[in-house]
Amino acid sequence: MSESRRDDMLARIREAVGGNRRSEEDLAQLEKRLTQPSAAPRPRVSDDRLGQFIAKAEANLITVERIASLQMLVPAVRALLSQTSAPPDISVAPALEHLGWPADWHVNIGAGRRKEPMSVTMAVAGIAETGSIVMRSDPTSPTTLNFLPDVHVIVLRASDVVDYPEDAWARVRAGAPGWPRTVNIISGPSRTADVGGIIVRPAHGPKSVHLLLCHD
Amino acid sequence: MQIKDGNFSTRASEALADASLQKSVSNLKRGFVAARARAVAALPEYEAMREAGAAIKDHTLDNLDFYLERYEREVVRQGGHVHWAADADEACRIVRQICTRAGAKSVVKGKSMVSEEIGLNEALEADGLEVVESDAGEYIVQLAKEAPSHIVMPTVHKTTDDIADLFYKHHRAHGFDERETDPAELIGQVRSILRDKYFAADIGITGANFLVAETGSNIIVTNEGNGDLTSTLARVHIVTAGIEKVVPTLNDAAVLLRLLARSALGMEITSYTTLSTGPRRPGDADGPDEYHVVLIDNGRTKMLAGTFRPMLRCIRCGACMNHCPVYMSVGGHAYGWVYPGPMGAVLTPMIAGHEKASELPHACTLNGRCQQVCPVKIPLPDLLRRLRHDQWEAGFIKSKVRWGIGLWAWLATHPALYRVSTRIGVAVLRLFGKSSGRLTRLPFAGGWTAGRDMPAPQGTTFHAAWAKRNPQR
Ligand code: SF4
């Protein structure tokens, strides 16, 4: 890209909006706006935040199961698998590697694979407003695990459920090294209505999303 | 994308004669309009949210240079590249250069209206690249060598049978030998074929519903997960976006996302909202090695400078077309370009030029529904009126259209005659609309009403009612 083309284009935009006439004071206001909390109206969230989160998630066709602690994760996943006869072959996010996965399972720790029956991942936040789950990419949480599996199992701490996306950004930012490459806000299984207007699940992503809400 | 030859009237008459199109369009009408109405009714804050959304957009547009520079700074800070394209040719050239430098052979694309606006697929294919659309709807129209007929539901003009035939013809090459008619099977074929394409792609191109100046992120919303896989699996992620897509903060984006899902699909939120910021970080197990954003002007600064600035608030939700009687009658292809319906009737002449789209601002009854449902309160009827005016001044209007408007204008400026002619009109219309209050047939105009469904006038004319109420006048 040529520098001058960029400058010409920006100059025309500046001219069109009268940006040249901006005072120091105006600029300070714009800077301030970038860091101010939002005052925009939002849909009301019930006082029972967790109750609303679960109800909304279920309305989004996310199945929700409560577990007492992360130690219950492997048994919960085993229960999901026992419904199929195939030998377990799953992918697990590095964040959950240490939880003692059975030695006789095939457990891929890392990014998602082309054929991916099930993945188990860890979320950073839940949003009560819409029943959504917030995933953050980092070395322990690959993005492909959110889209390639047939069944996506997500672990979320109940204490990480917030009211609004506006409250979730801080949790996304909290992990090192700052703002991540990818944030996925997941609000249901993958679907499409592009053939005859009939809803089909899945399209390109998971057919089902199972949430393990952890209470420790 | 090329602007179609011929004119709106011809394409509109063809569309009106197409029964299968009519069926799809009326399904759309029922589904989207009802779903949006439910979503809006469920939210007492909705009107205030619309105000807030429009205000965010206005504020950003008023300071667009500031926010674009800030956005650029943040993208670069996160290791990404920002390219500035004044027009469609420049934008295509930039993307082609990125592909060449990457030694690319294959491209997978998420849904991007602006990439269709600049004719990107054709440009890349001319360079010998394989380009595959990944949104199921876009994939289908690409295979059929057609244009999308709706900005949110590109296949609204195609029946399941059409798609079954299309896949039977093209998917045998991928080992699907049977003609399937079950939507789940058909989508299953797309899923399986695209899975391989995502992994093989050198380049993933997506659009952006929003660009966030605060973080240097681009946001896409999908229900399929296609754009999300496109952004993640290819070695190079390129984002094509109009300059008006930038918003100041993540919180501003949150406000607009609430409006978008409700207005587009009548839902609170889509299955996936994905924010991408720069290339993969050190130690990440996936994500692209390179991240590029192409900021595209292509006529937008021209709109920014004048009366048409409010049009740049558009968040491409499609609500205006779902509620437009003209769009509902003729479908999206009649508009001849990427953007159909009321928003297209403004954008097409503004981007492509009056001389290429002189009829579009007239494909409107000025009923005002579009403005009422627009989540960012764009005064579409005013802008269309303004365009008509500008075209009139510039002499772009065809004689027939001029004649129609001329007659109406003449009647309107001769009150006595106007009253008589409208009174006769009302009496005749009432006669035929008696039973249902809805007219679907008019005498001597079968061909005309076959494509139109108009409410029968209730009562008398405004003039007559006014006179009755105010006898002294
Ligand atoms: S003009 Fe308004 S209603 Fe139409 S697509 Fe744009 S934002 Fe939606």
Image (cartoon, rainbow, N blue to C red):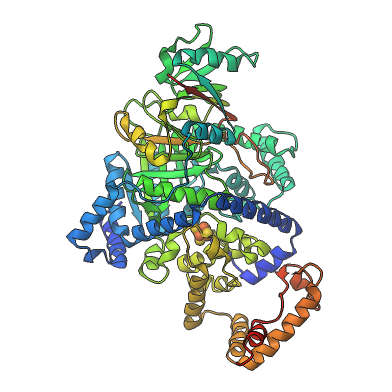
Instruction: Tell me if B456 is positioned left or right of A202 in this view.
Output: right
As drawn, A7 above or below B443: above
Please tell me in which quadrant of the rendered image residue B291 appears: top left
Can residue B314 be seen here? The reply is yes
State the count of labels.
0
For this rendering, which residue is in front, B187 or B50? B50
Q: Residue B343's x, y, as percent? A: 52, 63
As drawn, B144 above or below B174: below
Can residue B105 be seen here? The reply is no
Query: Which residue is painted at 50% across and 51% down in the image?
Result: B260
For this rendering, which residue is in front, B460 or B193? B460
As drawn, A53 above or below B303: above
Q: Residue A103's x, y, as percent? A: 50, 6
Please tell me in which quadrant of the rendered image residue A58 appears: top right
Q: Residue B373's x, y, as percent? A: 55, 60
Please tell me in which quadrant of the rendered image residue B280 appears: top left
Q: Residue A35's x, y, as percent? A: 27, 46
- Residue at the extreme top: A103
Q: Where does the C terminus of chain B fall, quadrant-wise?
A: bottom right
Instruction: Tell me if B28 is positioned left or right of B93 in this view.
Output: right
For this rendering, which residue is in front, B256 or B23? B256
Instruction: Tell me if A32 is positioned left or right of B212 in this view.
Output: left
